[in-house]
Image: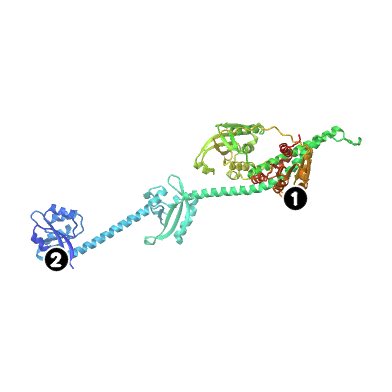
Amino acid sequence: MSRDLKILLVEDSEDDARLSILALRRGGFAPRFRRVQDASGLRAALELERWDALLADFSMPHFSGIEALNIFRTADLDIPFIFVSGLIGEETAVAAMKAGASDYVMKQNLTRLAPAMERELEQAAIRAKHRQALNDLKLSRDRYMDLYNFAPVGYLTLDQDGCIAQLNLTCATLLGNRRERLRGAQFAEFVAPASRAQWATQFAQVLGRGERLRLELQLLVDGGSMFYAQLDCVHVTAAQGKSMVRAVMTDISARKETEAELQRYEQQLRQVQKMESIGTLAGGIAHDFNNILGSMLGNIELARLELAMEPPTSPLPSTAAPEPAWNGRRKQSLQYLEEIHKSGVRARDLVRQILTFSRHEPQHLATQALHLVVEETYRMLRATVPAGVEIHLALQDRALFVHADATQLQQVLMNLCTNAWHALREGSGLIKIGLARALLSDADAKRLNLAASGPYAHLWVEDNGQGMEAAVRERIFEPFFTTKPVGKGTGLGLAVAHGIAIAHKGAITVDSAPGQGSTFHLYLPGVEQKLSLPIAAEAPESSRGHGEHVIYVDDDETMILMVERMLERAGFRVSVFQDALRAIATVREHPNDFDFVVTDFNMPDCSGLDLAQEMARIRPDMPVVISSGFITDELRQHAKDSGVRELLEKQNTSQELGKLVSSILSREPGRKT
């Protein structure tokens, strides 16, 4: 089968051209050809078409074969160029071959043309494949170099002395210098001093034992900055058997930052869980403690009332104590009771702090002008702290409103200022209370662990005291943590402040350093609503009874004795029960003999709520009050659903129960006046 061949002939003789084509046909080719005989024709043919081979006469009247060869070479084609001539000599032919011709054939011996063409076509095909292979190799190498140099990780090779033998552009960028300047440098120079011993040990392990290692190092960058890098190292053997270490370097600074942030969040979570656990425990302790306080404060009040009465008259004049002596002992006893009462009140306030910390103290939220809270607290502080302590106000913005419990905010401010006072050297120094508007960004809100960015009220308390070390700062808001001597602090003040800030959807932080004082920052969400008008206080109700029959139910015998005496002194008739079921049975038997029920909440067999519900079935119109040392929002809701008129904090029984009973009964139809 003939082989197709597209020939470009540079020949002035048409007959000679036909003879060459005939020789190729006889040699097994099926040629198609075009004949040109000058330079312009040759250039046009080379530009317009693609050819398999070119045959050129060496000597023509107006155009030579050498000129044709030169034009052919400028076209940069890798196809056979064969001279076909009858006048070319051997030396000329050799010169032509050196100039780029593939071969030459004498017109007198055209039988050589087909074999020469066959051979040159094969050589051209081989050269084309070789050239393609070289192009593919170059392309592959370029791709490899692109992947190597612009990889998202750094690649470097270290010799056995730890010097950088090779590195990619990414690695050079990470190390902060040009690649040319980094080659030959000791890699250990880029390792942070604290990590160099670790690097030396692990480099030796990879180099000597052939171990694959992954390690994390802090690396230095030209210019003084640092970054965290992960190195995956492997031993390789280079030319002449030299041991080297090849490493992949990954910048893990972002990961480290994320891990540090995660650790901060985990620490915050542990702190929250710790606070919740201690809060639950504190709430339970406060409940039991309030039962004790209620009885203690009530009996103290009864004792004070008894001592305030006239001295008894003795039937035996010889044994009667002189009146001045009796008055002296009474006055001294009242002083003792006053001290006991003060301690009891302090204990009650401490319990209230515990309940606030554990979030069991209910909030009374309203729109507050924050500067009024600060100024009122300032007046109380000024009367409390020693004269050697200066207190300055820096209220930069008076038009600041927050939705908050004013009493709890005062408690926070009092706690912060008391803490600042105790931190002052030798009891004298400066405390500054500041208030300003703050517009917090998303980054600020995230740093402060706030739910949202936006406008906040920024309240701060600054002192020039002794300051705190980092270890103290980290624990400063933990409950029961204190650096004060035994008896000088409970360790609850700042924990309570922290709990109140969180409950108000705010945040509290501290800046402090040893010898540089401390500044506590409180952030509360700002509101734009106008200040709520205060409700006028109602005229005080009389706490005296008019013989109304009150049932008091409590499983605590001391509370029963105290309440019975207290209500009888207030003018009420009292029936007391330690058994709630017995009280229910008595009322069921004589439903119209009683006017009022006061019951403890937490009792065995029958709770105060159960008793209230049963009383509502027997006497729906009879008021019921529940007393408890631990009032929760859940209890408030259940009490409301059960028709309970009021809830009474048990520790306030002596101060509030008589007034509460009288107030409720005064609103009942048919009350005696």
Q: Is residue 76 visible?
A: yes
Secondary structure type for disc 2: helix
Q: List the single residue furthest toward the bottom.
A: 1
Q: Which mark is nearer the camera, 2 or 1?
A: 1
Residue 261: horizontal and vertical position, in percent?
52, 48
Q: Amino acid at mark 1?
A: Leu
Q: Which residue is mark 2?
A: 25
Q: Is residue 107 above or below residue 501?
A: below
Q: Residues within 10 Å of mark 2 (few under 14, many from 20)?
A: some
Colouring method of the image: rainbow
State the residue in front, 445 or 467: 445
Residue 75 appears at what percent x and percent y? 19, 54
Q: Within 10 Å of the Cα at label 1, are there few (<14), some (14-19), or many (20+) other Cα atoms?
A: some
Residue 581, numbered circle: 1
Quarter residue 382 falls in: top right
Kind of residue at badge 2? Arg
Reply above or below: 240 against 530: below
Q: Quadrant of residue 336?
A: top right
